[in-house]
Amino acid sequence: MTVATRLKWCANWANGSTLLGMAIARIGRARVAKGPRGLYLAGGYRFDFPVAGAFTVGNVVVSKGDWTVLQRESPTLLTHEEQHSWQYVVCGGLPFLPLYAAALGWSWLRTGDFASRNVFERNAGLAMGGYHEHSVRSFGAALRSLRPGGAA
């Protein structure tokens, strides 16, 4: 491991985020294996939440799928998820979660999509994570979409 990777690994254990990631993987009955650059790859996750091809908690990258297949089908996904592991370090660990939730809300408000204007997803590389850019909509359109039967 490089010095930076070791720092990320230690920081995410110390801030509790990797421990939480391991607990989530265990509760979801995922199989955890050591991955590259200090990551842990948890495949076979059994819950439908969150709705994502993969998600990261600390240095644990969790997916419903098999990591061998995922890396073959989406070779940039792990690079994208690794960026999220760095974001946990920058945010001091678990504060990442409410900050990420706020970024989801902001992105949805601005585009009708949870990733397009999410600062964390943009920083990790939208396309690498399998996301598509959506146009920014007016606040008026966003407010109309909140009404029952409203449209974006």
Image (spheres, helix red, strand yellow):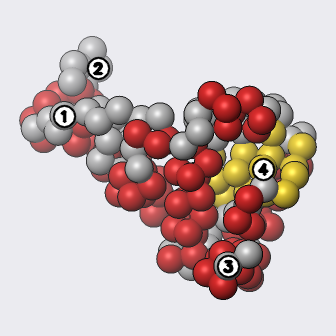
Report crowding for label 2: few under 14, some 14 to 19, many 20 or more residues within 10 A (C-alpha).
few
In depth, the one of 151 and 31 nearer the eye is 31
Looking at the image, can residue 58 be seen? Answer: yes
Looking at the picture, how far across and down is residue 82, in whole percent? Answer: 59, 58
Q: Which circle marks residue 99 in the picture?
A: none
Amino acid at dot 1: Ser
Question: Which residue does the image show at 77% across and 35% down from the upper left?
Answer: 68
Look at label 2 and name its amino acid: Pro
Alpha-carbon distance for marks 4 and 2? 41 Å
Q: Which comes before the other along the chain, label 4 or label 2?
A: 4
* In this view, 28 is above or below 151: below
| Quadrant of residue 14 within the rendered picture | bottom right
For residue 119, which quarter of the picture? Answer: bottom left
> Label 1's element?
loop
Distance CA(mark 1)–CA(mark 2): 22 Å
Residues marked 3 and 2 touching at CB (< 8 Å): no
Kindly identify which residue carries mark 2.
148
Upstream in sequence: badge 1 or badge 2 = 1
Along the line of sight, the residue nearer the viewer: 47 or 119: 119
- Which of label 1 and label 3 is nearer to you? 3
Residue found 63% across the figure and 28% down from its top: 73
Which residue corresponds to mark 4?
41
* Quarter of the rendering occupied by the N terminus: bottom right
Amino acid of disc 3: Thr
Query: Dot 3 corresponds to which residue?
Result: 2
Q: Quadrant of residue 131?
A: top left
Say whether disc 4 or disc 3 marks the residue closer to the N-terminus. 3
Position of residue 98 measured from the top left corner of the image (x, y, whole percent): 50, 61
Q: Nearer the viewer, mark 1 or mark 2?
A: 1
Query: How many residues crowd around disc 1 within 10 Å: few (fewer than 14), some, or many (20 or more)?
Result: few
Kindly identify which residue carries mark 1.
135
